[in-house]
Image (cartoon, rainbow, N blue to C red):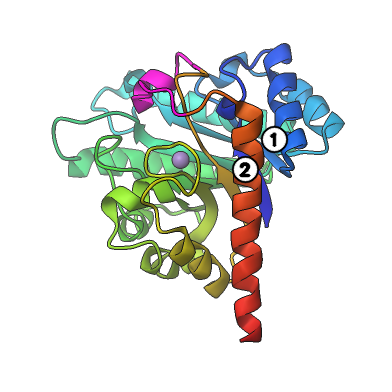
């Protein structure tokens, strides 16, 4: 398993200076991997990302949530085409940076919908995601669809919902991405969805119920890490936390980050790195019982 951290723990800017800030923060906290938010992949320089990550001994992954102008479920063909093009650019950035994973809300806009998803919208999305999966395969990039709560998409909100959506995706290079923050809102528990999605689970986000310090909210991390051990999960495990202390215009407002839950990125990150590794170590020893 690679233990990683989202770049927004350290900075809201991802120019060269911001990338160095995020990479050095991730390295100093003890992480193996840095996840970059590619909300606008056209602004990222893939080779530069790779050089900075290499300088800090970090693997790179990327995530994004589409906005309404790039929504793959839209009835407007031009909107869907912009979304398709943006996702292809995101795959290119990941590949140029030497990364192997693109994840997040790739299949719709990341926003509160005021209506259920339509059959036509789901079909549009599944078609573009199928093509994206095959495109990404040629670059060695795995595509994983993040299961998020009902206020951030109307396509699916549970692990089983994601499996159902994947039945209409023809590429087997598209898989499931679970996030404990969203699971805590929508799922029946933190154990069973990992078991249910086991064969398709390729990416994991670790977030607390309020998106602050791990262990200070209501997420049942004990069950979640036991489930990861039960399925021999070997993919990335990435800490996500957001506070008004670090602001990204593209992401903070979309996620509703209005409160200051921490103000010391280095302390937050070092704590999360220990918390995740301690949980993984503890469940490993269950095999000795
Ligand atoms: Mn997430």
In terms of image quadrants, where is residue 148? top left
> Does the magenta segment cover residue 252?
yes
Residue 175 locus on image (x, y percent) = 49, 54
Mark 2 falls on what kind of element?
A: helix
Q: Element under label 1?
A: helix
Picture coordinates of residue 107 (x, y %)? 38, 38
Identify the residue shown where x is 32% and y is 61%: 160
Task: State yes or no: residue 169 in magenta.
Answer: no
Q: Is residue 65 above or below residue 157?
A: above
Q: Residue at x 24, y 41 (%)?
A: 150
Residue at image location 40% in from the left, 67% down from the top: 191
Which is nearer the eye, 217 or 254?
217
Extent of the magenta region: 247-261
Alpha carbons under labels 1 and 2: distance apart: 30 Å
Residue annotated with mark 2: 271
**Residue in the foreground of this view, choosing between 19 and 42:** 19
Mark positioned earlier in the residue sequence (1 or 2): 1
User: Is residue 212 rendered to the left or right of residue 47?
Assistant: left
């Amino acid at each position: 398993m690679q233990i990683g951290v989202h770049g927004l723990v350290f900075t809201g800017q991802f120019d060269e200076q911001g990338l160095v800030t995020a990479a050095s923060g991730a390295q100093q906290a003890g992480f193996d991997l840095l996840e970059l938010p590619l909300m606008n992949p056209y602004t990222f320089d893939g080779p530069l990302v790779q050089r900075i990550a290499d300088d800090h001994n970090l693997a790179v992954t990327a995530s994004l949530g589409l906005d309404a102008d790039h929504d793959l479920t839209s009835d407007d063909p031009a909107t869907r085409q912009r979304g398709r093009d943006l996702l292809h650019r995101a795959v290119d950035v990941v590949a140029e940076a030497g990364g192997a994973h693109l994840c997040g809300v790739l299949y719709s806009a990341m926003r509160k919908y005021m209506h259920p998803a339509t059959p036509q919208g789901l079909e549009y999305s599944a078609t573009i995601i199928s093509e994206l999966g095959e495109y990404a395969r040629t670059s060695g990039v795995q595509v994983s669809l993040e299961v998020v709560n009902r206020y951030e998409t109307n396509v699916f909100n549970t692990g089983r919902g994601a499996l159902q959506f994947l039945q209409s995706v023809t590429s087997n290079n598209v898989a499931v991405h679970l996030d404990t923050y969203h699971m805590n809102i929508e799922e029946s528990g933190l154990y069973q969805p990992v078991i249910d999605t086991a064969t398709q689970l390729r990416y994991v986000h670790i977030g607390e119920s309020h998106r602050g310090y791990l262990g200070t909210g209501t997420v049942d991390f004990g069950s979640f890490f036991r489930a990861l051990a039960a399925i021999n999960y070997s993919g990335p495990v990435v800490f996500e936390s957001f506070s008004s202390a670090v602001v990204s215009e593209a992401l903070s407002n979309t996620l509703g980050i209005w409160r200051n839950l921490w103000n010391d990125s280095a302390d937050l990150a070092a704590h999360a790195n220990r918390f995740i590794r301690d949980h993984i170590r503890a469940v490993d020893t269950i095999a000795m019982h």
